[in-house]
Image: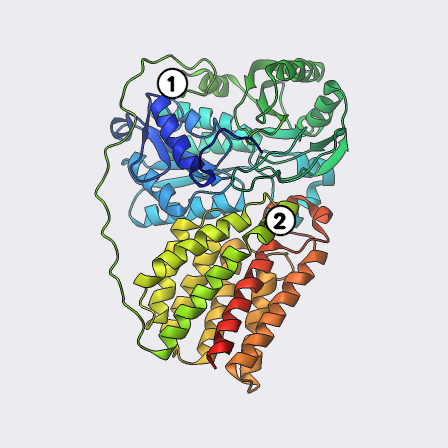
C-alpha cells in the first residue's frame, strides 16, 4: 500500500488542518474535526444552519460543500466511520441560531444513530433541529425487488446527497424557515436516485489492505461508498453497457421529463473515462424522452482511491433548477466563485474543559474485580484487532478491529479516574468515554450497553452476581431498542443476548458465579459462530445478503472475545 500520509491514526486530523489552510472560506471548530463557514457567527443570525458529515475518505465531501449557499458545517469522522455525537453537537452549537439547524444525513446506521443523538441533545436545550435522511441508492431494489429491502438496513445515501446539500443550501441562503428548508431537502432526497459500479477496491489507511478483491476482468455493481463490495459481481463490459446497467434501475424510478445528471468519480477514475460515461448517460436520458437540464461531472463523493463511477439523476422543475443554479462559494461545487486567500483558517480556541478528578485505587473487592475485568476486556480487544479487521473486511468495510482498539485504549486511559468502588458510576463514565472515542455504529451501541447497565446497577446490589446478570440483560435490551436489531439479525446481539440469558438462567439454577459466567461465554461463542449461517439484516453486511454466509459476524465475535477475557479474570480471582 502506498499513500501520501504520515501517521495512519492522524490522517483525519491532518486532513482537516490542510483543508482549513487551503480554503479561506472555512474555519476549524476548535478541538473538533469540524469545519464551519468562516462567516458562521454572522450567518447563524439570519439563516437556518445546514450540517452534514460522516466518515472521512469521501472527499471533497463534506467539507468541500461548506460555504455561502450550501452547508454551514461539515463533521468529519474517522475514515469510513461516523463521527460521534459530541462532534455533531458541537457543530450544531456553532452554526445554529434562533432559526435552528437542519442535519442532512446519509442512510447509514452509524450516521443515523450519532446525528440523531446529537439532535436530541440539542432539542433538549431548546435548539430547533430537524433531520433529513438521504437514501438514493437504487441498487438494492434493482437487484432484488421492493420486498427485499426489508431484509437489510435500507437504501444507502450516495452521491445524490450532494444535490440535496445544494438545494437546501440555496433555500437557507434565500431566508427560508427551518420547516421550509427541510421540506425542500426532503422532497429532493425522496426524488433523487443513484447507482454505482467499481473497477477496483480501496484501502483504508489504518487497515493497510483493500476491503475486498476484484479479478482483472471483474467489476462490482451497486456498491456503497465505504469500500464494501457491491450487490453483484459481473465480468467487465464496455462503458456503454455498464452505463445501461446503472441507468436501467434509475430510470425505472424517475418520473417527469426534466432532469439533471451527476456523474461522480468514486476516487480513481480519469476524467477521460468520466466523459465517456457522461456521453452515453446523457444519450440514454434523451432517448427516454427526458430533457437533461444540467450535467455535473467530477469528483463529488468518493471512496478514497476506488476506481469507478456512480450516476445520479434528479427530476427538476423551474424552482428546483433555480436552487441548483443559485450562487455558492463552496469550494467543491462546480463553478464556485473565486475568493482571495486569507489567513483566517482556524477558529479561536474555546475554553479548555476541566479534567475529571482522579478517583484513586479501589478499596473494595468488587472495585478491584471490576477494574481487572475492564482491563482484561479492553486488552483482549486490542489483541484481537487483526482478527476482527480480517472478519470485518469479509462482510463490511474492515474498520471494526481498528475502531474497537481505539475505544479499548480510551477505556484504559480513562480507567484510573473511574470510581471503581461505585460500579454504576464507572460504567456511566466509560459510556461517555466510548461515545466520544468510538465512532461509527459501535460507539453509540456500546455506550448504550454501558448506560443501561449502569442504570440497572443503581437499583441493585453490585456485589450480587444476579445484579450483573440483570445489568447485562438491560444493556442488551438497550442496544436492541437503539439499533432496531434482534437475535437472528446477525449482529452483536446474537452473542450478547444468549450470554445474558444463560448467565441469569445458570445463576437461578444455583450455579456459582464463575461457572455461570463460563456457560455464558460458551453461549456467546456459540451465538457468534451461528451468525456464519445467518443472512445479515442490519448494518453494512446486510447489503451483501447471502454473500456474507460462511463468515461470522465480527461484532458478535468481539462480544464473545471480551466476555471470555472477563471470565478468565474472575476465575483467576477465586
Quadrant in the rendering for residue 170 = top left
Residue linked to disc 1 = 329
Where's residue 466, x and y in %? Answer: 47, 79
Please, is residue 360 above or below residue 536 in the view?
below
Question: Closer to the camera, 100 or 80?
Answer: 80
Residue linked to disc 2 = 390
How many C-alpha atoms fall within 10 Å of the one at disc 1: few (<14), some, or many (≥20)?
many
- Decide if residue 179 is in sight here: no
Q: Please tell me which residue is depicted at 36% across the width and 73% down the height of the picture.
A: 367
Mark 1 or mark 2, whichever is nearer to me: 2
Question: Closer to the camera, 128 or 6?
Answer: 6
Is 419 placed left or right of 323 in the picture?
Answer: left
Contact, mark 1 vs mark 2 (Cβ under 8 Å):
no
Of the residues under marks 1 and 2, which one precedes in the sequence?
Answer: 1
Please, is residue 281 above or below residue 97 in the view?
above
Where's residue 85, x and y in %? Answer: 39, 46
What quarter of the picture does the N terminus occupy? top right
Quadrant in the rendering for residue 422 = bottom left
Helix, strand or loop status at disc 1: loop
Helix, strand or loop status at disc 2: helix
Where's residue 405, x and y in %? Answer: 48, 52
- Decide if residue 69 is in sight here: yes
Q: Please tell me which residue is depicted at 41% across the width and 71% down the height of the picture.
A: 370
Quadrant in the rendering for residue 484 = bottom right
How many C-alpha atoms fall within 10 Å of the one at disc 2: few (<14), some, or many (≥20)?
many
Where's residue 217, x and y in %? Answer: 77, 28
User: Which label belongs to residue 549?
Assistant: none
Q: Please tell me which residue is depicted at 48% across the width and 16% down the height of the picture.
A: 334
Amino acid at each position: 500500500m502506498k499513500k501520501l500520509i504520515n501517521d495512519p491514526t492522524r490522517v483525519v486530523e491532518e486532513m482537516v488542518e490542510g483543508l482549513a489552510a487551503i480554503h479561506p472560506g472555512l474555519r476549524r471548530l476548535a478541538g473538533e474535526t469540524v469545519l464551519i463557514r468562516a462567516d458562521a457567527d454572522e450567518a447563524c443570525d439570519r439563516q437556518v444552519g445546514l450540517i452534514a458529515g460522516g466518515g472521512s475518505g469521501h472527499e471533497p465531501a463534506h467539507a468541500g460543500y461548506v460555504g455561502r449557499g450550501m452547508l454551514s458545517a461539515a463533521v468529519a469522522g474517522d475514515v469510513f466511520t461516523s463521527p460521534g455525537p459530541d462532534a455533531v453537537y458541537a457543530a450544531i452549537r456553532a452554526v445554529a441560531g434562533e432559526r435552528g439547524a437542519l442535519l442532512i444525513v446519509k442512510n447509514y446506521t452509524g450516521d443515523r444513530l450519532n446525528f440523531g443523538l446529537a439532535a436530541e441533545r440539542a432539542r433538549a436545550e431548546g435548539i430547533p433541529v430537524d433531520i433529513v435522511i438521504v437514501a438514493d441508492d437504487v441498487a438494492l431494489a434493482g437487484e432484488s425487488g421492493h420486498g427485499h429491502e426489508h431484509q437489510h438496513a435500507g437504501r444507502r445515501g450516495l452521491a445524490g446527497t450532494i444535490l440535496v446539500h445544494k438545494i437546501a443550501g440555496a433555500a437557507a441562503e434565500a431566508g427560508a424557515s427551518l420547516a421550509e428548508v427541510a421540506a425542500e431537502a426532503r422532497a429532493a432526497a425522496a426524488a433523487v436516485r443513484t447507482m454505482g459500479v467499481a473497477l477496483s477496491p480501496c484501502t483504508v489507511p489504518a487497515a493497510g489492505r483493500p476491503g475486498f478483491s476484484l479479478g482483472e476482468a471483474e467489476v462490482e455493481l451497486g456498491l456503497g461508498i465505504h469500500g464494501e463490495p457491491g450487490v453483484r459481481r459481473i465480468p467487465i463490459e464496455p462503458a456503454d453497457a455498464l452505463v445501461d446497467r446503472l441507468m436501467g434501475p434509475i430510470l425505472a424510478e424517475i418520473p417527469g421529463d426534466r432532469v439533471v445528471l451527476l456523474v461522480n468519480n468514486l476516487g480513481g477514475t480519469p476524467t477521460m473515462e468520466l466523459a465517456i460515461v457522461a456521453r452515453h448517460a446523457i444519450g440514454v436520458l434523451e432517448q427516454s424522452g427526458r430533457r437533461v437540464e444540467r450535467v455535473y461531472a467530477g469528483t463529488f463523493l468518493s471512496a478514497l482511491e476506488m476506481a469507478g463511477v456512480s450516476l445520479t439523476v434528479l427530476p427538476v422543475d423551474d424552482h428546483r433548477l433555480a436552487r441548483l443554479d443559485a450562487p455558492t462559494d463552496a469550494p467543491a461545487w462546480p463553478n464556485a466563485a473565486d475568493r482571495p486567500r486569507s489567513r483566517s483558517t482556524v477558529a479561536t480556541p474555546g475554553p479548555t474543559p476541566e479534567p475529571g478528578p482522579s478517583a484513586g485505587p479501589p478499596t473494595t473487592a468488587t472495585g478491584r474485580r471490576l477494574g481487572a475485568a475492564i482491563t482484561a476486556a479492553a486488552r483482549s480487544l486490542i489483541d484481537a484487532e487483526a482478527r476482527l479487521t480480517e472478519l470485518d473486511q469479509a462482510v463490511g468495510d474492515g474498520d471494526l478491529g481498528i475502531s474497537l482498539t481505539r475505544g479499548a485504549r480510551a477505556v484504559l486511559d480513562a480507567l484510573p479516574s473511574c470510581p471503581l468502588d461505585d460500579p454504576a458510576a464507572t460504567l456511566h463514565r466509560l459510556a461517555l468515554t466510548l461515545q466520544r472515542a468510538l465512532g461509527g455504529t459501535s460507539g453509540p451501541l456500546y455506550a448504550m450497553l454501558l448506560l443501561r447497565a449502569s442504570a440497572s446497577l443503581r437499583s441493585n446490589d453490585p456485589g450480587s452476581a444476579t445484579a450483573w446478570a440483570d445489568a447485562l440483560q438491560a444493556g442488551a435490551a438497550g442496544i436492541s431498542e437503539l439499533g432496531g436489531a434482534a437475535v437472528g439479525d446477525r449482529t452483536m446481539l446474537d452473542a450478547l443476548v444468549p450470554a445474558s440469558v444463560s448467565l441469569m438462567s445458570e445463576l437461578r439454577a444455583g450455579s456459582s458465579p464463575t461457572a455461570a459466567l463460563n456457560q455464558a461465554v460458551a453461549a456467546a461463542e456459540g451465538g457468534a459462530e451461528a451468525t456464519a449461517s445467518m443472512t445479515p439484516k442490519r448494518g453494512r453486511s446486510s447489503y451483501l445478503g447471502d454473500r456474507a454466509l460462511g463468515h461470522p459476524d465480527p461484532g458478535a465475535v468481539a462480544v464473545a472475545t471480551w466476555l471470555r477475557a472477563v471470565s478468565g479474570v474472575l476465575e483467576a480471582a477465586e
